[in-house]
Image (tube, helix red, strand yellow):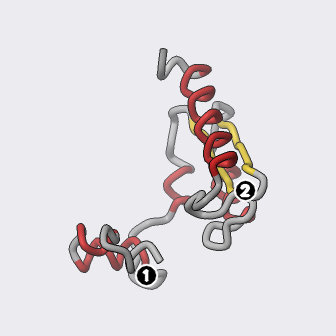
Amino acid sequence: MVNDGPVGLARYSTLRSWLSQWSYDESNADGVKSLAGVSVPVLVIGNLADDACTPSHTHRLFAAISHERKEIKEIEGANHYYFGQKQQLSEATAAVDGWLKRNALAG
């Protein structure tokens, strides 16, 4: 889907970095492990109709954050890319905007 289009991610990365993003066996990424060491405020957004990053994934990420300056926002009916979902995209954008303001990261 994302890599089939004219602006696919694979066009802008090396083979090694692409495999690290998309290959379960070759990835250097571990969101749960990495979030355990994050000390700054964190917002985790979960899209409840996302078949790529399911709600259980969202909750594992949120649970991995070791401090209390964390928030979770779940967007009902939202898919992975918000394709054709203006309302859900607006809700997610408002959540990010509010979070940035509450954490003095935006004016």
Name the residue rendered at 48%, 81% in the picture.
24
Sequence-wise, the earlier of marks 1 and 2 is 1
Of residues 91 and 72, the one drawn nearer to the viewer in this rendering: 91
Name the residue rendered at 68%, 37% in the picture.
71
- Position of residue 21 measured from the top left corner of the image (x, y, whole percent): 40, 71
Name the residue rendered at 51%, 46% in the picture.
37
Name the residue rendered at 70%, 43% in the picture.
72
Instruction: Name the outermost residue toward the right.
Output: 76
Count of number-bearing discs? 2
Going by the image, does 65 lie left or right of 34? right
- Position of residue 88 measured from the top left corner of the image (x, y, whole percent): 68, 48
Which structural element holds mark 1? loop
Which structural element holds mark 2? helix
Can you tell which mark lies on residue 23? 1
For residue 76, above or below residue 50: above
- Position of residue 34 measured from the top left corner of the image (x, y, whole percent): 49, 55
Type of amino acid under label 1: Ser
For residue 49, above or below residue 34: below
Going by the image, does 55 lie left or right of 95? right
Of residues 7 and 34, the one drawn nearer to the viewer in this rendering: 7
Mark 1 surroundings: few (<14), some (14-19) or many (≥20) residues within 10 A: few
Going by the image, does 84 lie left or right of 5? right
Mark 2 surroundings: few (<14), some (14-19) or many (≥20) residues within 10 A: some
Reading the image, the residue beneath label 2 is 59
